């Protein structure tokens, strides 16, 4: 705290009207060095705070103050802004002055709206709980929603509408942080910009850019001009594919360019074969689909391109079982499938790890995972509504009829294996026969196992355990025996 106070008033100690030019330069240099150290420490402090709280802004019982995208992140931006303000007429307003200098009108409006929303939530949280607790727990969410004027609408409860808004706000705070830190970094490294540009241009040329309009700026993938998307809307997907391939973060300029051009994602582009190939490359063959698809979600691209997925962005479920929002849970599950495929979970999931490399078609698995929860909150129910939505999405992407049928079946039945394994007696031949009648083929059985493992594991920390795994393995082995015509086989299975 003492360091913060010293830094707050350091600019006031540097008065070039009273100091000789050489002395002023020396003091200014020392302050600049201290400022860089302070900035680095504040960002490291923020990262450590996020890590302690799960490093996700989509935890369904978030910490309003310390959580990712919360009030403390806005405070951090305000503190860092003071280093970019220089000497101002009013030191008290130095942070606001810097924000006005660095952020656009729209970004400042977003900052103030987010601050007002989160501050109001925190005040109500303290009033209702009667203590200084900053965790937005399930027991207080309904009353806060009601006091903030949210009502049930279109089948969505008021509390879930409130929490959806909360997560949209934290996403906006994340975008502001990305923009602000990049601008701060650019100011801190001005003397090295020309050399850095030359080095990064060489790296990009060796990396074979997916589009001539892509550049690397400050170690992040960016665009020379947002106009490239107007000429080639599918280049939005090329940008994310390249970011995944080179393991680069997205520059805020590219982030903003995509967000401002989302109107280009129209019905024609959703049926464009080139765009579909690029998207499926990211989803099915990307290095880190969880990270890349999360970035696509934050820009608004994924929900715009796959409207069925857009329906569940920032959606919450008012229960104590799910730890994350529906969209984040879905993307985590996709990431887990990739981790199983690359051998990360060989010990935890030996059966799934042995199955995945030999699946006949992985596109159906990844698409089913992406779409498995899109029916949540719909009038037709999760299974039927989800199946219908999955068919529409897959048809637009140009999948073959048998692939569409496979994805639709997996979406409709994605809870079946878990329900049979955990709620039925897997040692009973009748249970196995009934399950085999639903699954019908060995390939579906294998797909369903991997899908179920990833789905459960992505629900939250500690949800998966060895007992669940053993029940599922027992069910799978018994069902395989039925398909082979073993002693558990029942003629009715194949009727």
Image (cartoon, rainbow, N blue to C red):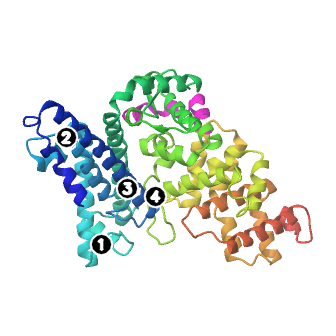
Q: CA distance from mark 4 to mark 1?
A: 27 Å
Q: CA distance from mark 1 to mark 2?
A: 41 Å
The first of marks 2 and 4 along the sequence is 4
Would you say residue 184 is visible in this rendering?
A: yes
Between residue 284 and residue 416, name the one nearer to us: 284
Q: Which residue is mark 1?
A: 143
Q: Which residue is mark 3?
A: 46
Q: Is residue 277 covered in magenta? A: yes
Q: Is residue 398 above or below residue 146?
A: above
Q: CA distance from mark 2 to mark 3?
A: 21 Å
Neighbourhood count class around disc 4 (C-alpha, 10 Å): few under 14, some 14–19, many 20 upward? some
The first of marks 1 and 3 along the sequence is 3
Q: Which residue is mark 4?
A: 55
Would you say residue 413 is visible in this rendering?
A: no
> Picture coordinates of residue 217 (x, y %)?
43, 30
Q: Is residue 8 covered in magenta? A: no
Q: Nearer the viewer, mark 2 or mark 4?
A: 2
Q: Residue at x 38, y 27 (%)?
A: 193
Neighbourhood count class around disc 1 (C-alpha, 10 Å): few under 14, some 14–19, many 20 upward? some
Q: CA distance from mark 3 to mark 4?
A: 10 Å
Q: Is residue 479 above or below residue 96?
A: below
Quarter holding residue 455:
bottom right
Q: Which residues are magenta?
A: 258-280
> Picture coordinates of residue 301 (x, y %)?
46, 39
Magenta stretch, main secondary structure class: helix
Q: Secondary structure beneath disc 1? A: helix
Q: Which residue is mark 2?
A: 85
In what quadrant of the picture does the N terminus appear?
A: bottom left
Q: Tell me whether circle 3 and circle 4 mark residues in contact (CB < 8 Å).
A: no
């Amino acid at each position: 705290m003492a360091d913060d106070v010293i830094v707050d008033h350091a600019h006031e100690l540097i008065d070039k009207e009273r100091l000789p030019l050489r002395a002023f330069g020396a003091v200014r240099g020392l302050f600049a060095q201290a400022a860089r150290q302070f900035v680095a420490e504040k960002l490291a402090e923020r990262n450590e705070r996020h890590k302690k709280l799960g490093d996700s802004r989509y935890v369904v019982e978030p910490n309003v103050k310390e959580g990712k995208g919360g009030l403390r992140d806005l405070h951090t931006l305000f503190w860092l802004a003071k280093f970019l303000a220089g000497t101002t007429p009013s030191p008290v307003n130095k942070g606001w002055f810097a924000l006005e200098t660095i952020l656009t009108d729209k970004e400042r409006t977003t900052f103030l709206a987010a601050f007002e929303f989160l501050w109001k939530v925190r005040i109500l949280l303290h009033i209702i709980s009667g203590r200084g607790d900053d965790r937005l727990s399930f027991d207080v969410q309904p009353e806060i929603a009601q006091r903030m004027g949210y009502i049930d609408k279109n089948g969505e409860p008021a509390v879930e509408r409130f929490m959806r808004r909360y997560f949209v706000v934290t996403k906006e705070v994340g975008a502001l942080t990305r923009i602000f830190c990049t601008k701060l970094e650019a100011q801190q490294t001005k003397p090295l910009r020309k050399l850095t540009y030359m080095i990064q241009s060489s790296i990009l040329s060796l990396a074979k850019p997916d589009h001539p309009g892509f550049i690397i700026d400050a170690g992040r993938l960016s665009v020379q001009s947002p106009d490239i998307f107007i000429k080639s809307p599918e280049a939005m997907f090329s940008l994310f594919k390249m970011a995944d391939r080179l393991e680069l973060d997205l520059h805020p300029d590219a982030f903003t360019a995509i967000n401002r051009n989302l109107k280009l994602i129209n019905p024609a582009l959703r049926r464009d074969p080139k765009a579909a190939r690029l998207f499926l490359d990211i989803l099915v063959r990307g290095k880190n689909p969880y990270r890349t698809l999360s970035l696509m979600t934050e820009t608004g691209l994924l929900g715009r391109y796959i409207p069925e997925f857009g329906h569940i962005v920032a959606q919450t479920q008012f229960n104590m079982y799910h730890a994350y929002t529906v969209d984040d849970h879905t993307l985590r599950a996709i990431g887990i499938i990739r981790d199983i495929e690359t051998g990360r979970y060989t010990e935890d999931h030996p059966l799934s790890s042995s199955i995945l490399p030999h699946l006949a078609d992985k596109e159906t698995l990844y698409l089913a995972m992406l779409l498995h929860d899109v029916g949540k909150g719909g009038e037709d129910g999760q299974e039927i509504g989800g199946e219908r939505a999955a068919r529409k999405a897959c048809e637009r992407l140009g999948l073959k009829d048998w692939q569409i049928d496979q994805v639709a079946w997996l979406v409709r039945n994605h809870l079946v294996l878990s329900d049979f394994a955990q709620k039925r007696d897997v040692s009973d031949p009748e249970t196995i026969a009934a399950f085999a009648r639903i699954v019908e083929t060995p390939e579906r059985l294998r797909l369903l196992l991997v899908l179920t493992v990833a789905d459960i594991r992505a629900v939250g920390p500690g949800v998966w355990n060895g007992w669940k795994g053993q029940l599922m393995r027992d069910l799978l082995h018994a069902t395989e025996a039925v398909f082979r015509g073993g002693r558990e086989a029942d003629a009715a299975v194949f009727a």
